[in-house]
Amino acid sequence: MVVEKTKKILKQEVYHLIRNDVKLRELIAEPLGIAESSVYTYAVRKSPTLQKPAVLNVIKKYTNKKESELFET
């Protein structure tokens, strides 16, 4: 029996927040070791890089949301 892994997708509002909040982009860029403008590009492209644990921790802390609230159901 093969069990298919379901892929989590960040909510559109999370991508929107990242695109429109410079401070959040700066906080996300730090653990990734990239420029803030690259984080914006990742949000536009909906890159899976934004689903890394370090990034999710930054978003959770910044927004005071649980991880389950960041993903589509």
Image: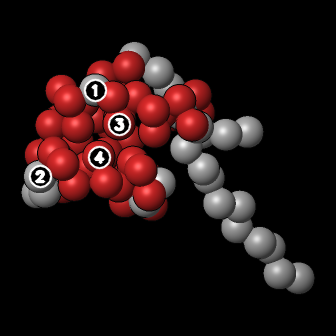
Q: In this view, does 62 lie above or below 44?
A: above
Q: What residue type is labelled 1?
A: Asp
Figure quadrant of residue 27: top left
Secondary structure beneath dot 3 equals helix
Q: What residue type is labelled 3?
A: Arg
Secondary structure beneath dot 4 equals helix
Residue that badge 2 annotates: 35
* Image position, residue 57 (x, y; %): 33, 37
The residue positioned 28% from the left and 26% from the top of the image is 21
Of 59 and 47, which appears nearest the observer?
47
Q: Which amino acid does label 4 sit on?
A: Tyr
Give the alpha-carbon distance from disc 4 to disc 3, as whole Å. 5 Å
Give the alpha-carbon distance from disc 4 to disc 2, as whole Å. 9 Å
Figure quadrant of residue 11: top right
Q: Which amino acid does label 2 sit on?
A: Ala
| Residue 48 in sight here | yes
Determine whether label 4 and label 1 are within 8 Å by CB.
no
Determine whether label 4 and label 3 are within 8 Å by CB.
yes
Give the alpha-carbon distance from disc 4 to disc 1, as whole Å. 9 Å
Please tell me which of labels 4 and 3 falls first in the chain: 3
The residue positioned 73% from the left and 39% from the top of the image is 73
Residue that badge 1 annotates: 21
Determine whether label 2 and label 3 are within 8 Å by CB.
no
Residue that badge 3 annotates: 19
Q: Is residue 61 left or right of residue 11?
A: left
Please tell me which of labels 4 and 1 falls first in the chain: 1
